[in-house]
Image (cartoon, rainbow, N blue to C red):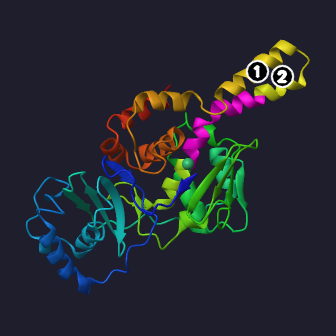
Amino acid sequence: MILLLGGCALRHHLHYEPVAFALAPYDPALVTGMSTQLDQMRGHAIGEIRTAGGAPVDDLGSLPPEVVWAAWSTALGWARGAELDLLVDGAPVTVWWSVDRDLTLAWSDATIWRAPTGVTSEWLVDTYGIGGVFDGDRTWGAAELATLDLSLSLLTDEELPAVSGVRFVREGVSPRGLRELAWYDPTDEPPEISIFDAAFDIESDGFVGPVDAPLPAGVGSILHEIGHALADLEARDAWLRCGVARAGSDREERRDACRAYAEVRRRGPRIDAWQRFRDGRPGPSSFGFRNPHESYAEAFALAHVDPDALERALPGATSWFERADTR
Ligand SMILES: [Zn+2]
């Protein structure tokens, strides 16, 4: 599962924070006043302000107005420790606030990835081996299918078995609440991933990926659920073996196969390895940062869309995923 967050719970640690909410409507007339307020906050509520290249920003008026807007919108303390990818009037701006409230700003004039048209369910099944794309109480839109295609295209050959046979279902609102973006349901074979309206919300002022190659935030939500599916692969396999052994007559085989399933049912080897790597560190995002499954899923998504951001949030994680690929 992945939730839309109201605030950040990790302010004492550097972390990446997915943005699935709308900023105040952009109004360039307000930017000069924002610059003045940010200047007044320097030295107490805000420390150093610099660009991603390390250059100090002495004159906020020299920044593009969208960058000032992003800085001001996150300056009230809730974003402390967080790296956020914001779209301000369509312009991508990455802000990262250190735990000491220094501010680093990155921006580009790139436009967000535009979905190609013509992606069909059949093509996705043929190309990636998924179980199919199904309409729940919503119908998949053309841009949404293209976003799913983009997400699947980022998987390595070693990761593709995670989506083998998986059904992708488009639903409106999660039965578990409005704030949920997507959901991996392992209780059926093949498993199902539901994607809710909130994951594709065009009102969201967030993106994922590098600031000079921004991708729709929905890619992050879909990859997060695929991360759960990958972590669940061993359990899926063990469950099927247990089912086969149950149908057979060999008692010992049945006992061993179903015992093997019980061992990985709640937590497979990938999550164990992830926990050993994290070694008590929180992150990479505040969502479920105490929960190893959610931590892994968030990191999995970031490893695919923005490895540099993952590395800033959790040093060593990007190469951990590169190694995990070939394990
Ligand atoms: Zn999740």
Tell me, yes or no, if residue 31 can be seen here.
Answer: yes
Residue 186 position within the rendered picture, expressed as x and y whole percent measured from the top left: 69, 43
Q: Nearer the viewer, residue 10 or 257?
A: 10
The outermost residue toward the right is 249
Determine the secondary structure under disc 2: helix
Label 2 close to label 1 by CB (< 8 Å): yes
Magenta stretch in the rendered image: 225-240
The verdict on residue 230 being magenta is yes
163 shown above or below 265: below
Q: Position of residue 52 (x, y in %)?
A: 20, 55
Give the camera-side residue of 136 and 186.
Answer: 186
Query: Exactly how many numbered labels are in the figure?
Result: 2
Residue position for label 1 = 257
Q: Residue 45, percent across and down?
A: 18, 63
Residue appearing at x 55%, y 43% in the figure: 227
Could you tell me the amino acid type at mark 1? Ala
Work out whether mark 2 precedes mark 1 in sequence or the reverse, and give the earlier one: 2
Residue 75: image tag: none
Please identify the quarter of the rendering in which residue 38 is found. bottom left
Q: Is residue 86 left or right of residue 181?
A: left
Count neighbours of disc 1 (C-alpha within 10 A) and say few if under 14, some if 14 to 19, many if 20 or more: many
Residue 183, placed above or below residue 274: below
Q: Which residue is mark 2?
A: 245
Q: Confirm whether residue 117 shows in the render.
A: no
Inter-mark Cα distance, 2 to 1: 7 Å
User: Magenta span has 324?
Assistant: no
Horizontal placement of 271 versus 30: left or right?
Answer: right
Q: What amino acid does circle 2 point to?
A: Ala
Q: Residue at x 82, y 29 (%)?
A: 243
Residue that lies at the very extreme toward the left in this rendered image:
58
Which one is nearer the viewer's eye here, 63 or 77? 77
